[in-house]
Image: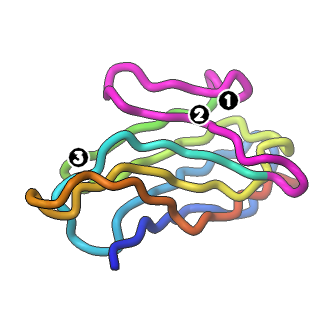
Amino acid sequence: QVQLVESGGDLVQPGGSLRLSCTASERIFGIYNGAWYRQAPGLQRELVAAITNPNSPNYADSVKGRFTISRDTAKNTVYLQMNSLKPEDTAVYYCNADLKIKPTIPVRNYWGQGTQVTVSS
């Protein structure tokens, strides 16, 4: 069964950078409407960034100017570049995307398993 797989989470010092990647576990026809969410301990999952149109991504106010979401359609991968990281960015980051497995199968929404980002000195 196809899964979304995130990678790139790590422990980083405040002010540092990380790039998260999200891709399908096997070859698929296409990836659409990618988004990144995060969930810190004791808090609800929140939307960090979303991309439905390559020219108009959306960001949570808390990450505007620091995070950049992008999509590589050739690699069927969604990225989240995170710069100037702060301790309050510490959370499990989840990828969410609409995948078209095959041309004859309708688009379906998938969640990844999450990747831990810890910002601490």
- Span shown in magenta: 40-65
Q: Quadrant of residue 82?
A: top right
Contact between labelled residues 1 and 3, with CB atoms less than 8 Å apart: no
Q: Amino acid at mark 2?
A: Phe
**Residue 67 as seen in the image, left or right of residue 30:** right
**Magenta segment: does it hold 49?**
yes
Q: Give the residue at mark 2.
A: 67
Residue that appears at 85% across and 48% down: 43
Is residue 1 depicted above or below 95 in this figure? below
Q: Residue at x 63, y 62 (%)?
A: 9
Query: Closer to the camera, 104 or 79?
Result: 104
**Residue 6: % across, % down:** 50, 64
Residue 26 place in picture, x, y as percent? 27, 74
Give the CA distance from mark 2 to mark 1: 6 Å
**Amino acid identity at mark 1:** Val
Q: Residue at x 63, y 64 (%)?
A: 115
Q: Residues within 10 Å of mark 2 (few under 14, many from 20)?
A: many
Q: Is residue 69 magenta?
A: no
- Looking at the rendered structure, the kind of residue marked 3 is Thr
Of the numbered discs in the image, which one, if any, rests on residue 63?
1
What is the spatial separation of the Cα atoms under label 3 and label 1, in whole angstroms?
24 Å
- Is residue 121 in view? no
Instruction: Give 24 or 121, whichever is nearer the viewer.
Output: 24
Residue nearest the observer in this picture, 51 or 101: 101
Q: In what quadrant of the picture does the C terminus appear?
A: bottom right
Mark 2 secondary-structure assignment? strand
Compared to residue 57, the image places residue 67 above or below, namely below
What residue would you read off at disc 3? 73
Q: Could you tell which of marks 3 and 1 lies nearer the N-terminus?
A: 1
Mark 2 vs 1: CB contact within 8 A: yes
